[in-house]
Image: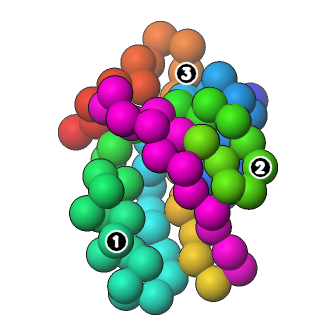
Amino acid sequence: MNIDMLLPLELLEPGEAAEVVEVTGKSSFVHRMAEMGLRPGCRLEMLQGGSPCLLQMDGVRLSLRIDAEHAVVVRPLGAHEPYGRGR
């Protein structure tokens, strides 16, 4: 996979790591995601795809269901980039 490509979170395969580039949708959704740590710059790993998907961020697992009104855009990380803390 081209690591410069941006894609929706739900297209990550289990085991893939990525950096969040953008969280869009209703302000309440964007705010809630930020409260849980899912914001631009954070790194995560997809543990289980589907709806809801299961993510790992900073040692915390998060189950997330994203609908058509909301989006989390990510940049897949290369094998040499750990998914731990982002910027």
Residue under numbered circle 3: 78
- Point out residue 29 in the picture as x, y percentages from the top left corner: 43, 78
What's the residue at 68%, 75% (across, down)? 67
Q: Which residues are magenta?
A: 55-68
Q: Secondary structure at mark 2?
A: loop
Q: Along the polypeptide, which appears first: circle 3 or circle 1? A: 1
Task: Answer few, some or many: residues within 10 Å of disc 2's Cα (few below 14, many 20 plus, some between 14 and 19).
Answer: some
Q: Secondary structure at mark 3?
A: loop
Q: CA distance from mark 3 to mark 2?
A: 22 Å
- Point out residue 65 in the picture as x, y percentages from the top left corner: 63, 63
- Three-letter code for the amino acid on which mark 3 is drawn: Gly
Image side of residue 59 versus residue 19, left or right: left
Q: Nearer the viewer, residue 7 or 9?
A: 9
Q: Along the polypeptide, which appears first: circle 2 or circle 1? A: 1
Quick check: 32 above or below 4? below
Residue under numbered circle 1: 32
Q: Comparing marks 3 and 1, which lies closer to the viewer?
A: 1
Question: Within the image, what quadrant is residue 75 found in?
Answer: top right
Q: Secondary structure at mark 1?
A: helix
Q: Are marks 3 and 1 in contact (CB under 8 Å)?
A: no
- Point out residue 55 in the picture as x, y percentages from the top left corner: 53, 40
Q: Nearer the viewer, residue 50 or 78?
A: 50
- Point out residue 31 in the picture as x, y percentages from the top left corner: 30, 75
Q: CA distance from mark 3 to mark 1?
A: 28 Å
Quick check: 48 above or below 31? above
Q: Are marks 2 and 1 in contact (CB under 8 Å)?
A: no
What's the residue at 37%, 54% (across, down)? 38
Residue under numbered circle 2: 50
